[in-house]
């Protein structure tokens, strides 16, 4: 395959910064991409890195991966995770890493969703939530829970149980915001696709 053809193929696979690569180096990158293997981040489009990050737990992210993202991609990732997007690039990265650290610390504690106060099972539901919060409080020292709260900008109350409940509520709220954002994006994409299809039909019928 000629070098020009290799460059076209590399571009179709989302490879960037390949213009100065030798033929053998370009062939190696293409082969790795086709096999689904990792290549140096500098040769991947930020959008592809973002996609890779959303396919694994947040606590597996590395700073070098986040640093390879553009500010727009970092903002999108923040929206997906339900956390603020403000600040300079390094602030966005640190906020995402702090979020990931706290999520890892509380990952095993999964209380049920809060149900309506009018539901006959509301009392049992609340008891289960309180029990999970107590389990989280029992696992960590007070200063550790307080540090988690500070990392994600949650008010650290005076009791371990209160801090545990605050952290669980924080994660639930983040999940809800992230899910709303993803759903809104899917709806918007669907509407755009429908509009494009309508335009094609109108052009054919003209």
Image (cartoon, grey):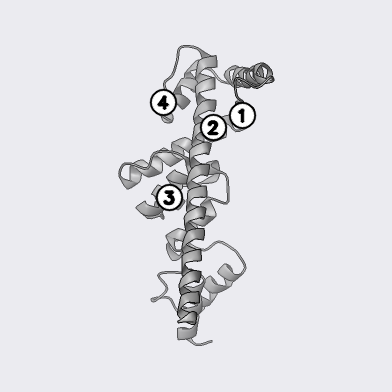
Which is nearer the N-term, disc 1 or disc 4? 1
177 sits left or right of 118 in the view: left
For disc 3, the marked residue is: 76
User: Residue at 50% across / 22% down in the picture?
Assistant: 166
Secondary element under disc 1, as helix, strand or loop, is: loop
For disc 1, the marked residue is: 113
Q: CA distance from mark 1 to mark 2?
A: 8 Å
For disc 2, the marked residue is: 172
Badge 4 density bin: few <14, some 14–19, many ≥20, Cα 10 Å: few
Which is nearer the N-term, disc 1 or disc 2? 1
Q: CA distance from mark 2 to mark 4?
A: 17 Å
Coordinates of residue 142 in the picture (x, y in percent): 50, 16
Rendered image quadrant of residue 203: bottom left
Q: Is residue 85 above or below residue 49?
A: above
Badge 1 density bin: few <14, some 14–19, many ≥20, Cα 10 Å: few
Q: CA distance from mark 3 to mark 4?
A: 23 Å
For disc 4, the marked residue is: 150
Instruction: Name the foreground residue: 115 vs 130.
Output: 115
Coordinates of residue 198 in the picture (x, y in percent): 49, 70
Q: Is residue 84 above or below residue 202?
A: above
Rendered image quadrant of residue 86: top left
Instruction: Name the foreground residue: 20 vs 15.
Output: 15
**Nearer to us: label 1 or label 2:** 1
Instruction: Name the foreground residue: 131 vs 25.
Output: 131
User: Residue at 55% across / 45% down in the picture?
Assistant: 60
Contact? badges 1 and 2 (CB < 8 Å) = yes
Q: Which quadrant would the C terminus be assigned to in this image?
A: bottom left
């Amino acid at each position: 395959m000629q070098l020009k053809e290799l460059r076209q193929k590399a571009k179709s696979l989302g490879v960037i910064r390949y213009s100065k690569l030798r033929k053998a180096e370009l062939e190696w990158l293409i082969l790795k991409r086709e096999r689904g293997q990792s290549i140096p981040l500098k040769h991947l489009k930020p959008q592809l890195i973002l996609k890779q990050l959303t396919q694994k737990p947040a606590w597996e992210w590395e700073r070098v991966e986040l640093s390879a993202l553009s500010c727009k991609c970092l903002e999108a990732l923040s929206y997906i995770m339900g956390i603020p997007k403000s600040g300079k690039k390094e602030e966005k990265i640190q906020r995402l890493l702090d979020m990931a650290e706290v999520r890892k610390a509380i990952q095993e504690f999964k209380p049920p969703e809060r149900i309506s106060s009018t539901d006959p099972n509301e009392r049992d539901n609340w008891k289960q939530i309180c029990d999970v919060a107590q389990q989280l409080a029992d696992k960590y020292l007070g200063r550790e829970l307080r540090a988690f709260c500070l990392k994600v900008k949650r008010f650290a109350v005076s009791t371990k149980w209160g801090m545990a409940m605050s952290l669980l509520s924080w994660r639930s709220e983040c999940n809800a915001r992230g899910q709303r954002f993803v759903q809104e994006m899917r709806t918007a994409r669907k509407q755009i696709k429908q509009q494009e299809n309508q335009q094609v039909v109108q052009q054919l019928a003209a």
